[in-house]
Image (tube, grey):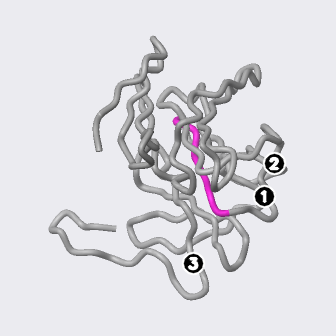
Amino acid sequence: IKEGDGRERQLTLGQLKPGVASWIANGDVIVFPSLRKRALYRMAVNGGQPEPIAVGSVGSNTAVSPDGASVYFVRRFYIMQAPTSGGTPTQVTDQGGFPLRLSADGKWIYYARHRYSTEIWRLRRTDGFTERLTNSLRPGCWGCWSVNDHALVYIATGSDDTARLERLDLTSGRTQDLGN
């Protein structure tokens, strides 16, 4: 993590090799899976020690709900949800999903189906409604996208097989080519 003066400080210790980390809303705590231990951890960034979160085995990706109450993670290509304090996880979908990203209001979970997927999907948390947003993601570039309340931006493959940046407006459904 970078300190206010620009210096970097290592957050993890020993055998904990973190996967994709997520911040709890106040920015003081991160949640991450340990790739070596296949377990989930919570850690205060002010110098605290990593604390295990009892949810069982996890994969390599996490996302924390905006209210900080739930953590979403991947287990055997299934998206799971559990309290950030630990507890029995529930399965959200069996359609794959990583990396995981949540909308700012926490209503949607965004994900790619698998590492070589060309599709990005979203799932509405309240009722499980699922929709494909694009099938233009560059193959093998499963983590090459970002989402906010208004748009999904991702690396796509052009007709001549070159990479290009695209923006999908989440309200209108229109796609805009942002160039190479």
User: In x, y percent, where is residue 42?
Assistant: 58, 62
Compared across the picture, whether 2 is left or right of 132 comes to left
Q: Secondary structure at mark 1?
A: loop
**For marks 3 and 2 on the same chain, the one whose residue lies earlier in the sequence:** 3
* Residue located 69% across and 45% down the image: 113
Toward the top, the furthest residue is 172
Q: CA distance from mark 3 to mark 2?
A: 22 Å
Q: In the picture shown, does residue 132 fall above or below 101? A: above
Amino acid residing under circle 2 = Pro
User: How dense is the environment of label 3, judged by Cα within 10 Å: few (below 14), some, or many (20 and up)?
Assistant: some
Q: Which residues are magenta?
A: 60-66
Left or right: 16, with 130 as reference point? left
Residue at numbered disc 1: 55
- Give whichever of 47, 104 is nearer the camera: 104
Residue furthest to the left: 5
Quarter where residue 17 is shown: bottom right
- Where is mark 2, residue-wise? 89
Residue at the disc numbered 3: 17
Marks 1 and 2: in contact by CB < 8 Å? yes
Q: Residue furthest front?
A: 160
Give the position of the N terminus as an image quadrant.
Answer: bottom left
Going 48% across and 16% down the picture, which residue do you hit? Answer: 173
Residue type at numbered disc 3: Lys
SS of the residue at dot 3?
Answer: loop
- Mark 1 or mark 3, which is nearer the start of the sequence? 3
Q: Which of the two residues, 99 or 125, is positioned nearer the viewer here?
A: 99
